[in-house]
Image (cartoon, rainbow, N blue to C red):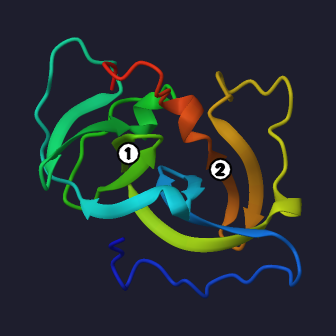
């Protein structure tokens, strides 16, 4: 896994002793903080232009060649119903494994690695008016604020290997 030394501090937050703790890589999209299980993160890379393919979902920026693997890159802001990101050199792509697929997620910046006791993860409130919340697996409070933990299997289902 590749992390820029100035972006992530693995000791930034400690968890409660004796509890089952999972680590999450957190990143920013606008003012929102999201997290994914660190075990699913393959690497983090600076934005590079992608090749646009026809008939892709509106939130797909295109594909990139990552050392011989063709990786679809999805715009997280657009995936959650916001406007498409106009990427700059400050944007990053979080490369994750979802089942047998490798997927890139375009975000504004990587912020931290946090340790989260399983008991501290809260469910998304029912009836929340922010659209489809099924892609949020839980919420946790960190020193930086509320973190929405992404359920990548729900966001990017793997049953149809032809769809990015």
- Give the image location of residue 87, x and y in percent: 24, 46
* Element type where label 2 sits in the image: strand
Residue shown at the point (62%, 33%) measured from the top left: 135
Tell me: residue 33, above or below residue 85. Answer: below
Is disc 1 placed on a helix, strand or loop? strand
Q: Residue furthest top?
A: 55
Report if residue 15 is visible in the image.
Answer: yes
Where residue 40 appears, as percent x and y from the top left, is 49, 55
In the picture, the disc for residue 105 is 1
Q: Is residue 145 left or right of residue 86?
A: right
Q: Left or right of 80: which side holds 46?
A: left
Compared across the picture, whether 70 is left or right of 32 comes to left
In this view, the residue in front, 1 or 138, is 1
> Quadrant of the rendered structure where residue 86 is?
top left
Q: Residues within 10 Å of mark 1 (few under 14, many from 20)?
A: many
Residue closer to the observer: 123 or 118: 118
Residue drawn 34% across the image and 63% down it: 43
Residue 34 position, x and y percent, is 57, 52
Q: Reading the chain from its start, which is encountered first: label 1 or label 2? A: 1
Residue identified by numbered label 2: 149
Q: Residue 49: where, in percent of width, then height?
A: 12, 45
Q: Is residue 82 visible?
A: no
Q: Is residue 125 above or below residue 109?
A: above
């Amino acid at each position: 896994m590749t992390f820029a030394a100035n972006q992530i501090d693995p000791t930034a937050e400690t968890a409660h002793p004796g509890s089952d703790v999972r680590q999450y890589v957190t990143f920013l999209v606008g003012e929102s903080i999201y997290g994914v299980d660190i075990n699913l993160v393959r690497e983090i890379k600076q934005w590079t232009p992608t090749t646009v393919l026809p008939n892709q979902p509106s939130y797909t920026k295109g594909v990139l060649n990552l050392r011989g693997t063709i990786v679809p890159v999805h715009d997280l802001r657009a995936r959650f119903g916001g406007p498409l990101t106009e990427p700059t050199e400050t944007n990053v792509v979080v490369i994750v494994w979802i089942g047998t697929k490798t997927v890139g997620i375009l975000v504004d910046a990587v912020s931290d690695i946090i340790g989260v006791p399983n008991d501290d993860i809260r469910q998304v409130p029912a009836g929340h008016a922010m659209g489809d919340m099924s892609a949020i697996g839980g919420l946790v409070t960190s020193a930086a604020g509320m973190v929405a933990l992404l359920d990548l299997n729900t966001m990017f289902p793997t049953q149809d290997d032809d769809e990015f």
